[in-house]
Image (cartoon, rainbow, N blue to C red):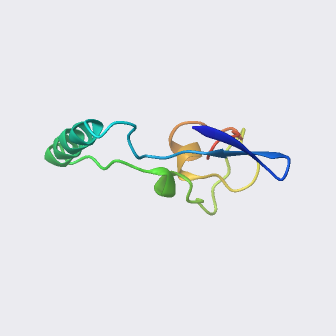
Amino acid sequence: MKSTLRNNQPEMSASDIPFLKEHLNYEIIVQQFLKKIKYTLLDDNDLTLEVPNITLELREGTPSVYNCLFEDMSSFYPY
């Protein structure tokens, strides 16, 4: 998570790129394990997709995949 100031407004961003090259090895191991047990890792693009025709008690507006799976309230970042 990174915060920068742009046009006097705070801007939040995130990256899935590891800080250290060695961490890429961990990602490979985790991906292989997930594939073996037939799980799918959902990234930010998947989790931020809107789910139409769904209403959640604590969520204003159209909920995202993240809201449906984990938290049904409006949250600041990123979902």
| Residue shown at 58% from the left, 59% from the top | 51
Where is residue 37? Give x, y as percent.
Answer: 17, 42
- Tell me how many marks there are: 0
Nearest the eye: 32 or 1: 1
Furthest toward the left, the residue is 36
| Residue shown at 63% from the left, 55% from the top | 54
Furthest toward the right, the residue is 8
Instruction: Identify the image quadrant of residue 66.
Output: top right
Residue 76 left/right relative to 47 = right
Nearest the eye: 18 or 39: 18
Nearest the eye: 21 or 41: 21
Residue 37 left/right relative to 65 = left
Where is residue 7? Give x, y as percent.
Answer: 83, 53
Furthest toward the bottom, the residue is 52
Residue 71 left/right relative to 15 = right
**Quadrant containing the N terminus in the rendered view:** top right
Instruction: Identify the image quadrant of residue 52.
Output: bottom right
Where is residue 18? Give x, y as percent.
Answer: 38, 40
| Residue shown at 71% from the left, 41% from the top | 74
| Residue shown at 26% from the left, 46% from the top | 39
Nearest the eye: 20 or 40: 20
